[in-house]
Image (tube, coloured by chain):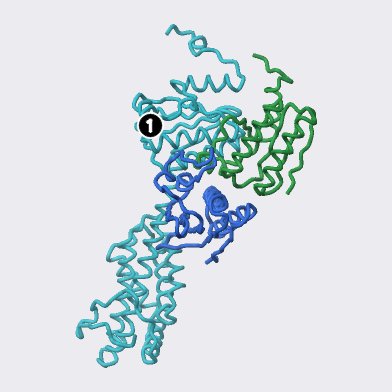
Chain colours: A blue, B cyan, C green
Amino acid sequence: MANEAVVTINTDADVVAARQKGRELATELGFVSTDSTLLATAISELARNIIRYAKHGEILIAPVQSGDRVGITVVARDKGPGIANIPLAMQDGFSTSGGLGLGLPGVKRLMDEFHLVSDANTGTTVTIKKWKR
Amino acid sequence: MGDQRAKRNEDKGQGVSPTREMPPPDDVSTVSLLRELVAHLRKNRTQLREEWARRITAAKLLGAMSSEEMFAEATSVYDNYVEVLETGAVEALQAYARDLSERIIPRGVETDEVVGIVLLLRDVLARSLFAKYQTDFQLLNRILDAYEPAANRIANTVAVGFVQERERIIRQQQEAIRELSTPVLQVRERLLILPIIGVIDSQRARQLTEQLLRGIRTNRAKVVVIDITGVAAMDATVANHLVQTVEASRLLGATVIVTGLSPEIAQTLVTIGVDLGKMNTVGDLQGGIEEAERLLGYKVAPFSEISQQPI
Amino acid sequence: MEVPILKQGLYLIASIQAALSDLDLVHLRDALAEKVGKFRARGVIVDVTVLDVMDSFASRTLRDLAHMTRLRGAETVIVGIQPEVAFAMVQLGLTLEGVDTALDLEEGLAFLDKKTKRHPSRG
């Protein structure tokens, strides 16, 4: 099975690197190209959130298996200020800055599973999964 | 690992023992017993195989096959079976079971038949062991101790392989049906029609969108008519998919016209607050095609003028 | 990576060659806004065929680009968005509202011809 990758997110160039890693792994695992694109797009948004709200963080991209299902899990972690109002951030159409926003509901729509933990002390961790069709 | 887990009725030999997670034959005496067993099965191959085929026929299994086909399959199952007994490696058998299943499933062979023939083989072989070792009860017992777990493992492998293959085929067929049920039709240059019929769930809506977007690109379509006359109901999720389809098509440079909205669906769209400004709707498919042709720059004569019928 | 901008008649054509960082996109936006004035261009085509991801930043920058060039007197059309990319974009809620799109370069040129009335289409 393919290996996991950790991409440190510090600059906007890392956003591109992270999503390319995601696409590579998806292709390696035989994802259909639409799903590879959905995954790469979601990773791009998560990496962007890290830079925008926390400046630094990391993204882990790893294969997962459950029964005979194969998928990819992505964990985006930062030690930033955290999200003050999670229900609000998960509301469609919410954005903190004119259209750029957190984009989290969108990311959730792109993925099969979505999990968000955030508080002011520890920062934000978003875990997403996409299963191979 | 070395403890005797299988308790068996001494005078019957057909006792039930656990089929899962049989430890591989690891102790020396088991290995040498299996080797003796394998030699016996190889030596009597012709006769045992025929006996097995006879039993299969008598039990009316594999009726979908001609007797030649059945005998050919039986031969390769037999050889594979013996090989697994010899090597303890089930990988080859798994591959063979998949391959066999792939061939016989389209012929209509059922799960119980596959399980049935493997159990029959197990039985035929066990009986021949009885016959051979009946004079030495101790040895018979030990031979059966070695044989049974291996035989059960084989039966299990073949049955599981068959069921998995069947499930794979069913999934594939479902996929094919879904593809079929959302045909993207090119009615003329640059114009696609997507008639949607039946129940749309989230998954189908998604598939339909993907298919349409690919269709737009490959056919270089400029206008798409999505006709949902055949769709009885639409919940909010699916309605949102429809809106997304319209928006995604526009990103590729194509205009979408939606036709055939039933009053119920119109109500759903209004209730959930779909932005109707984004949606180009026309009453029926005929009207939608006329509108599409107008957008494409064709001159359209009203239907009533062509047919010259007073309406 | 710098995006080459070609001048063809009254149009500017920016053909993206590889994945772009945010900074590259911002440069492209600014360069086009500047060149539209310099070349008195009437139309701009941004070819994004090679982009395999279009996230919120890219969408917003392209939208800004289109609005900026419009304010400077040129229509912009985005061409070559891939089917999968469009699919992901709409799920993220990125619809490039108010921005014109076309299938590919050829369609983009035809669109601009029509829109800038170089070859007014008959009725």
Where is residue A69 shown, x and y percent of the image?
Answer: 43, 59
Where is residue C89 shown, x and y percent of the image?
Answer: 54, 41
Number of numbered discs visible in the structure rendering? 1
**Residue A42 versus residue B140 in the image, above or below:** above
For label 1, the SS is: loop
Which residue in the protein does label 1 denote?
A: B272
Residue at 46% across, 55% down: A128
Of residue C58 and residue B294, the one placed in the foreground of this image is: C58
Quarter of the image where the C terminus of chain B is located: top left
In the current view of this chain or complex, which residue is farthest to the top?
Answer: B310
Q: Is residue A20 left or right of residue B308?
A: right
Q: At label 1, which amino acid type do we have?
A: Ile
Where is residue B83 shown, x and y percent of the image?
Answer: 44, 78
Q: Residues within 10 Å of mark 1 (few under 14, many from 20)?
A: few
Q: Is residue B83 left or right of residue C2?
A: left
**Residue B240 versus residue A31 in the image, above or below:** above
Residue at 36% across, 35% down: B235
Circle 1 chain: B
Of residue A77 and residue B177, the one placed in the foreground of this image is: A77
Quarter of the image where the N terminus of chain B is located: bottom left
Where is residue B97 shown, x and y percent of the image?
Answer: 42, 66
Which quarter of the picture shows residue B199?
A: top left
